[in-house]
Amino acid sequence: MPGEETLLAIADVNLDRLVGEDAYLGVTPERFFISTQNAVRKQGTIEREFPLSDVRYVRFRERDKRGPVLDVITTDENIRLTFDDWAGKGQGLDGTRRVANLLAAAMNLPEAERRTDPLLAGTSSTQPAITP
């Protein structure tokens, strides 16, 4: 691991961008990484890593008869990972939920990135804000 960080979790995932591309998702106290299984096994390399401070939103969705989907939104990328069918039930589902929860605990939207709009401030949800 980079900087001898502790590996908190690792998951067998599929990269959504490449059909059938098996990868590993790993989480350390400082970052998460995604790397194809071939790169890890053959070269011992991690292809992409992201600081946990860049995680903005995490969505975990269960799907009927298929493995779950994990979306990780960072400051610069929208990453979609899927899990095989084994992860859709029982201990597999519990494990994938745990990895998603671990990443969700890192969600962070810094004050400098927050936006406000006067149309939302003090406007009742029953009265539309329409300008003539």
Image: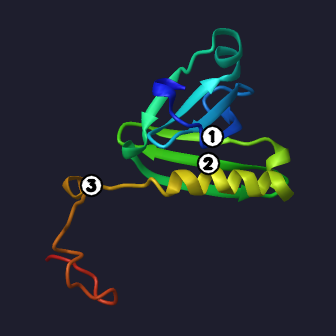
Q: Residue at x 65, y 26 (%)?
A: 18
Q: Amino acid at mark 2?
A: Leu
First reached walking from the N terminus: tag 2 or tag 1: 2
Relative to 127, does residue 48 appear above or below in the rendering? above
Q: Residue at x 69, y 42 (%)?
A: 82
Q: Amino acid at mark 3?
A: Pro
Seen in the image, is 48 located left or right of residue 129? right
Helix, strand or loop under label 2: strand
* Residue at the disc numbered 1: 81
* Residue at the disc numbered 3: 110
Helix, strand or loop under label 3: loop
Mark 1 vs mark 3: in front: 3
Q: CA distance from mark 1 to mark 3?
A: 25 Å
State which quadrant residue 94 falls in. Answer: bottom right
In which quadrant is the N terminus drawn?
Answer: top right
Marker disc for residue 70: 2
* Residue 75 position in % (x across, y down): 35, 42
